[in-house]
Amino acid sequence: MGLKSVLCAKIEMKANKDVFHDVFTNKPHHVSTMSPLHVQGFDLLEGDIGTVGSKICWTYTLDGEKKISKQILEAIDHENKVLILKEFEGDVTNKYDSFKATLHIETKDEIDLVSWTLEYERPNENVPELINLLNFVVGMTKAIDDHHAN
């Protein structure tokens, strides 16, 4: 049994709060245009964009290295603006027993926030926490926000 971890980040948005939910559910192929330093590509592997059960593949750069993440869209809640992606193949699951990312758009005290939760399981104590991946997601989020705010 591995070591379960959860990392969270909340980023205040300048753009309209509906933008992020729309981008990741309906237009994920635009992410590489909005955040080219982070994400270089998107492919739909199976199903339809924005449909639970569809399979996608991201190509991205983390710590100067090209990476891939094949994910399944596990859940979408349009009303609460929640999206859950689970990696089934890729650079993270090559080292970690499991990986899931949850995107939630929320408003607190009239401030719109993009909330990311990364849940994963490390096989042992020698495998590091995914702090670098959380920083990557925050940077990508800020780049997408800047793209829409300008």
Image (cartoon, rainbow, N blue to C red):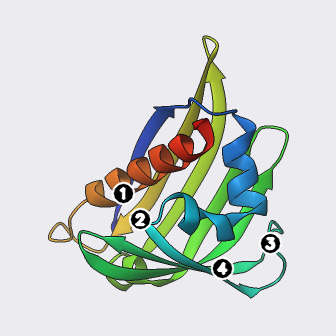
Q: Mark 4 and mark 3 in contact? Answer it, CB < 8 Å.
A: yes
- In which quadrant is the N terminus drawn? bottom left
Q: Secondary structure at mark 4?
A: strand
Query: Which residue shows up at 74% across the image and 63% down it?
Result: 27
Crowd class of label 1 (few under 14; some 14 to 19; many from 20; radius 10 Å): some
Label 4 to label 1, Cα distance in Å? 19 Å
Label 2 to label 1, Cα distance in Å? 7 Å
Write down the residue under mark 4: 56
Q: Mark 2 and mark 1 in contact? Answer it, CB < 8 Å.
A: yes
Write down the residue under mark 3: 49
Quarter of image, res 76: bottom right
The amino acid type of the residue labelled 2 equals His
Query: Which residue shows up at 29% across the image and 74% down it?
Result: 123
Disc nearer the start of the sequence (1/3): 3
Q: Secondary structure at mark 1?
A: helix
Q: In this orientation, does residue 1 appear?
A: no
Write down the residue under mark 2: 38
The amino acid type of the residue labelled 4 equals Ile
Q: In this orientation, does residue 85 appear?
A: yes
Query: Which residue shows up at 78% across the image and 37% down it?
Result: 80
- In which quadrant is the C terminus drawn? top right
Write down the residue under mark 1: 136
Quarter of image, res 107: top right
The amino acid type of the residue labelled 1 equals Phe
The amino acid type of the residue labelled 3 equals Ile
Q: Is residue 61 left or right of residue 39?
A: left
Q: Is residue 100 left or right of residue 19?
A: left
Q: In front of the other: label 4 or label 2?
A: 2
The percent coordinates of residue 35 (x first, y second) are 49, 59
